[in-house]
Amino acid sequence: MSITTNYGQRMAEIAEKVEHGERLSLEEGVYLYESDDLLAIGQMANKVNLRKNGKKVYFVDNMSLYFTNVCEEHCAFCHFRRDEGQEGAYTLTPEQMFEYIDQHIHPGLREFHITGGHNPNVPFQYYVDSIRALKERYPNVTIKAHTAAEIEFFSRLSGLSYKEVLQTLIDAGLDTMPGGGAEILSERYRKKMHLVDKASTEQWLEVHRTAHQLGMKTHATMLFGSIETYEERIRHLIYLRELQDETGGFMVFIPNAVQPASVSAGLKKRVSAYDNLKTIAISRLMLDNIQHVKAYFINLGTQLTQLAFTFGASDAHGTIIQERISHSAGALSPEGMTRDELVWLIKGAGRIPVERDTFYNEIKVYN
C-alpha cells in the first residue's frame, strides 16, 4: 500500500520528506498541528527516533534543588514564586541546602538540577557562592543550574555581560544549564503572559548561544498549552533548530505542558493527552538536529510517558527526588521516581532503559 493511500496527499508528501531525512518547513509543522491524524504523525516521529536512538530510552539519577522561591517576575502561569517576606518565601544558605541534600542523597546520584526565583534581594555573589559550595562538597555530582532567564537576570543584577556571568559560574562549578525560561519564544506571547521583564526571545537565545560558545552543552524547553498559536509553537522550534545549526550545543528538547492552578483542577483546565503526544511527535519531526526529545513524566504522568516513547521521545528525565515547580501548579504526577521505577516504566513500554550521566554518556544498559 502506498504512502499516499495511507496518509492522504499532503501528509504523504511530509512522510516522503521524513523518509528521506529532509527538513520540514514552518507551513508543514503547522499543518501537522492542524491535522487530526495523530497516529500518522506518531508513526513518522517514531521512525525518526528509532533512526536516531534505536529503542534506547535514557534517564539520569538526579535531584531537584531550589535555593530560593523569591522572584521579581510575575509570570501568569507560575504558582511557585513568592515576594520577599510573604508567607512561604525562602532563600536558603548553602548549609541549609546541604542539610536537605544529605537527607536524600544516595550512592549513584549524578546530577543536581537547580532552578529558582529571580531574587533581587541577594547579590549575584550569593548565586556564585552557592554553586561553589555545592561543587566543593559534592565534587562528583554534575551541577545543572540557572536558566537563560536567570542568567539574563544575573547580568542586570551584577552589571556583567552574559559571557562574564556564565564564565564566573563555570569557574565556580557550573556544568550545564537547564532549558527553562523559554516558555514560548514569541514577543506577543511574552507580553500577554506578563513576561515583559523576563528575558526576551533574542536574549534567551543569546544566552544559550554564549554558553555554547564557551563550550557548554545545554537544554531547551517549550511551555505549551495556554494562549500561543500553532504557528508560534513551530516558530519556537525553528528558533531552536536554527541556533542548533549554528552552535550544535543543545543536547535535548523538553516540551512541557502548562499545569493548572491546583491539583483539584478539572479536565478542562489541563492540556489533553492528545496535544501532549502530538507536540512530542511534532517536536521530534521538526528538530532534526537535536538528538533527544524528552518525555517529562512530571508533566505527563507515568502512563502517558510510556506512550510518548513510541511518539518520538527518547528520554524519561530522571529520579528528581522532590519536584516543586510543576506540583505547585497542580501537577498530578509523582514528585519523583526511583531508579527501579524508571527502569520498569521504560521496559513496560517495550524500550531499553539506559542510565546516563547529564551529557548522555551511557552508565548502564538494562537489557
Image (cartoon, rainbow, N blue to C red):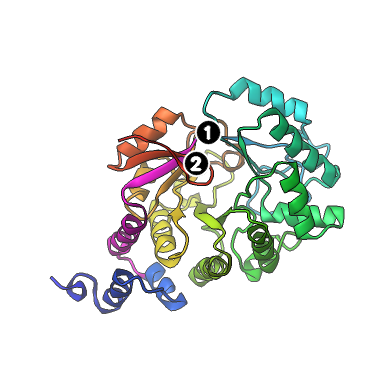
- Secondary structure of residue under mark 2: helix
- Relative height, residue 218 to residue 356 (above, below): below
Image coords of residue 162 (percent x, y): 76, 59
Q: Which residue range is magenta in the image?
A: 35-60
| Image quarter of residue 304 | top left
Residue appearing at x 31%, y 55% in the figure: 50
Residue most extreme to the left: 1
Residue most extreme to the top: 103
Q: What residue type is disc 2 on?
A: Ile
Per the image, the residue denoted by label 2 is 298
Horizontal arrangement in the rendering, residue 227 relative to residue 270 (left or right): right
- Numbered tag placed on residue 335 in the rendering: 1
Image coords of residue 323 (percent x, y): 57, 36
Horizontal arrangement in the rendering, residue 176 relative to residue 39 (left or right): right
Mark 2 Cα shell of 10 Å, populated few (<14), some (14-19), many (≥20): many
Most frequent secondary structure within the magenta stretch: helix
Q: Earlier in the sequence, mark 2 or mark 1?
A: 2
Compare residues 23 and 110 and report the one nearer the observer. 110
| Image quarter of residue 199 | bottom right
Q: What residue type is disc 1 on?
A: Glu
Compare residues 73 and 137 and report the one nearer the observer. 137
User: How many marks on residues?
Assistant: 2
Quadrant containing the N terminus is bottom left
Image coords of residue 74 (percent x, y): 73, 53
- Secondary structure of residue under mark 1: loop
- Relative height, residue 196 to residue 66 (above, below): below
Residue appearing at x 20%, y 72% in the figure: 3
